[in-house]
Amino acid sequence: MNTKTIPSSTLILSFSFLFLFSATWCFGSEINDRHSDIRFKIDKSISLFKQARYNEALPYLEDVIYEGSTNPDVHYITGEIYYVKNELNKAIKHWEIAQTYSPNEELRLKIEKTRKELKLDKKHIDKISCNLVLKYNQNDTYASDLILHSLVNSYNQLAYDFGWYKNSEFTVILYSNEDFTNILDFPSWAAAIYDGKIRIPFQYASFNLEELEPIIRHELTHALLHRICGNNVPAWFHEGIAQYKDSIDDSASREILREAVNNNNLISISDLGMDFGRFKDDAKVKVAYAESLDFIEYLIDNYGFYTILDIINNFNTHSHLDELFASVYGLDLSQLEESWKEHLRLQYL
């Protein structure tokens, strides 16, 4: 039997081709795996961020940044988390990187505002009790003790009401009225603000704890709702629950609502999903607050407070508000709104 001998040069070329093909395939596979891992970490961090699970989101973001990511969203979200943690220098650093990759006027203003806030922060003293951090000017030491005591009492009661027993730190900052309105640029009608931190305008000469306690309860409610539900809670739900818990007399709110019903000036619930600060008309802001409170009271009066707790505790288990409300009430949000408006018409017309 005759056999053919394959030239050695041909064998070498064949093996070289197979080696190169194998190496290229392995290298390409490794790159794809790396990209998939980065994409997973980005998606996971965004999901955790939306749920306000910041300490869990941060390691994923830091891993992606260590890998050399230039994704502006990664740096923006990292900045947001550091901002909530009151690490302002780190927040600015990451926002500036995000701004470099994707210039944005809103982010530029945010960076500018945070730089001003950083200057104020350096003047503050920290006082810690339980999981509350109070930042204040050294001239207000006596008042800070009273305020921190009120904060702890209000927090313990609200945490019990909402069934929140996790170890989570909340920051409260006292500002002079001038700093609050001018430097921080908050609306003139705001008694206080929660934006990841509770910010309270305060002047020692006009200090009145009885007036301040409802404000503390209101903003602490915002803080707890944010930690439990995350970043996607509609403004009307936030403000309705916060007003319900602050226990301020609502007779003025009812009068505003009466006028809105009679003048056909009610705002649809769907238009109250965004921050009320975007309304330029103070009268519209008052209607927005009045509606939010009354709609929440309507739900509680007719279905019980436990249904509100069901909404809060299941907020991240549904992709749409209608789906969530239908699962709790058997009616979607628009049906509940129509039922509430009919109640208002019967009450005020």
Image (cartoon, helix red, strand yellow):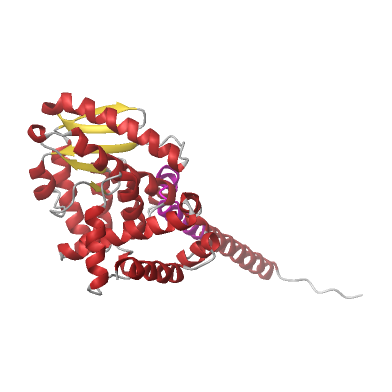
Residue 338, image quadrant: bottom left
Q: Quadrant of residue 131?
A: top left
Image quadrant holding the N terminus, namely: bottom right
Residue 25 on image: x %, y %: 59, 64
Q: Is residue 348 magenta?
A: no
The chief SS type of the magenta part is helix
Read off the magenta span. Answer: 35-60
Residue 337 position within the rendered picture, expressed as x and y whole percent measured from the top left: 40, 68
Q: Between residue 191 and residue 102, name the one nearer to us.
A: 191
Is residue 58 rendered magenta in the image?
A: yes
Q: Residue 184's x, y, as percent?
A: 15, 49
Residue drawn 46% across and 36% down?
A: 165
Drawn side of residue 275 relative to residue 241, left or right: left
Answer yes or no: is residue 232 visible. Answer: no
Residue at 13% from the left image edge and 27% from the top image edge: 138
Tell me the quadrant of the picture where the C terminus can be found.
Answer: bottom left
* Vertical relation: 32 (above or below) 211: below
In this rendering, is residue 120 above or below 299? above
Measuring from the top left, give residue 42's x and y in whole percent. 44, 56
Comparing 197 with 342, the one in front is 342
Question: Of 25 and 82, which appears nearest the observer?
Answer: 82
